[in-house]
Image (cartoon, coloured by chain):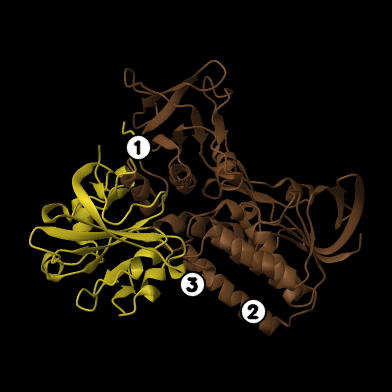
Chain colours: A yellow, B brown
Amino acid sequence: MSEGIIFTGVPSKEELKKAPGIPSKERMMKGPVAVIECIQEIPCNPCEAACPFEAIKITSPHVPYLDEEKCVGCGSCIPACPGLAIFVVNMAYSDSKALVSFPYEFLPLPEVGSEVEAVDREGKVVANGKVVSVKSSEKYNKTVVVTISVPKEFAEEVRGISLGRSKT
Amino acid sequence: MERAEVAIVGSGPAGLSAAVEAKKFGANVVLIDENSRPGGQLFKQIHKFFGSSEHGAGKRGYQIGLELLEKTRDLEVNVCPNTIVYGIFNDKKLGLFNEYKSEIMEAEKIIFSTGAYERSLAFPGWTLFGVMGAGAIQTMINIWRTLPGKKILMVGSGNVGLVVSYQLLQAGADVVAVIDAAPQIGGYGVHAAKIRRAGVPILTSHTVKEARGEKRVKEATIVKLDEKWRPIPNTEKDLEVDTICIAVGLQPRIELPSLAGCEFKYLPQLGGFVPIHDDNMETTVPGFYVAGDSAGIGEASSAMEEGKLAGIAAVESLGYLDKKEAEEIKGRIRQSLLFLRIGPFGKPALEAKKKIIEAKRLLI
């Protein structure tokens, strides 16, 4: 099967490498930073206004560009993205663990401190994670931001948690 | 019933927006809908909308619907629910049927914002209980909060198929797979990525061959297609599902523009036959306007902009707005429509709309 977002619904490694919303490896190692997995030109721009540090700009082509030096990884952009395509990764969390924050719109909400199955972009369970925070506010407009800790080596793959459904 | 200066048929996003604009500038507006409440499909859109802040990006569809309803209330727009427009007589007389009585309403300007029909898909077993349109399923889960089934096969990977799959997961169902006969996913990548992360496979170049079951669907057979969309023998796969959701596209609902004598152009990118209209949304019959899906299939944000455009154009021609002021407002709305049609997903609609407007110019 052909790779890439239009064939599989999962951005390929190549697509992610080229995406201007993805920070560099060096920046990732320094601490929390937004990872914007928005690679198709669609008529959308709320992430730009959501960033208090003006670290996100939409120019041409019409996709978000991340200024990785300005970004502090605050995560304000996560619930602002209608496509649920923004994550925050913190590789400097501890020696062995990284934090991954992602938007979540399912009930029940995971509980802080609970063990969860961390899934990759294809929904495959790749690691065990622990829920570090579950944030919501009126501004988030019903999208909850969940942060989990996972072994560092999985931080680039993990983008959510298992909903506990049967897989085909 | 009184005479309306602007009668609007259909109170979805386009009709509500048209009503708000037209009433804002002082026209006597009547907004007619066959359903028991206004809003069209907006109230079942529980996901956040795209667009820019001026389009309400980040708000959920139903929240935009509530805002529009509030505006129609504040402006005291005359809303007539449960009212069917069954005919158009002698230029601009609308035949209305409301519960027990029928009556004739005369209007100076008429805006059709009648929405769309869902396309269907025929296959052995398609009449079984459990084979449903995506619109019906979305109404059941998001309005009536009732799950139509527990294990769903979604047919169609356009934005409707992807969004309804996600909403089915939110409602607690298991989406066993999303299939599409096309070799590529039709909708936005970000919508597809959401359901992939939730563990739902998306199979392109696949179609449903058969549904089986006694009283309702129990099993579906899907099959892989070659590059000419022909089933490849021995690639069949059986899926245990109780519901097959059909999300294979929409076509404009155009009976009323047709009765009014409007001319049409066939544009597959816009869903089929579309009333020819200019950049004021006015059809080939003066005083009749179209907006939203009935003017060519699009998304709700564009429908709202088209509705505003039709509303402004209608009140301008009634003399409530001078040309300069109207052009300024319409210019902003047209810019906004251009924004909503940027990128590879907007391009087909953008080009088809240019053709529609050119067709009108050639007819004059």
Please rate how many residues cluster around mark 1, counting C-alpha atoms within 10 Å: few if below 14, some from 14 to 19, many from 20. some
Marks 1/3 in contact by CB < 8 Å: the verdict is no
Q: Are marks 1 and 3 on the same chain?
A: no
Quadrant of the rendering where the N terminus of chain B is positioned: bottom right
Task: Give the quarter of the figure containing the C terminus of chain B.
Answer: bottom right
How far apart, in angstroms, are the residues tagged by discs 2 and 1? Answer: 54 Å
- Residue picked out by circle 2: B327
Looking at the rendered image, the disc whose residue lies closer to the viewer, 3 or 2, is 3
What is the CA distance from the residue labelled 1 to the residue labelled 3?
Answer: 35 Å
Residue A150 percent coordinates (x, y): 18, 54
Which chain contains the residue that carries disc 1? A
Q: Quadrant of residue B93?
A: bottom right
Chain to which the residue tagged by mark 2 belongs: B
Of badges 1 and 3, nearer the viewer stands 1
Circle 3: residue type: Ser
Return the residue nearer the eye: B81 or A135: A135
Q: Is residue B130 visible?
A: yes
The residue at 92%/46% (across/down) is B101
Tell me the residue that label 3 is attached to. Answer: B53
Q: Nearer the viewer, residue B322 or B189?
A: B189
Query: Amino acid under label 2?
Result: Glu
**How far from the left and from the top, in percent, is residue A154?**
15, 52
Asked if residue B132 is positioned above or below residue A79 in the image, the reply reads above
Report if the CB atoms under discs 3 and 2 are less than 8 Å apart.
Answer: no
- For label 1, the residue is A165
Residue B192 higher or lower than B219, as above or below:
below
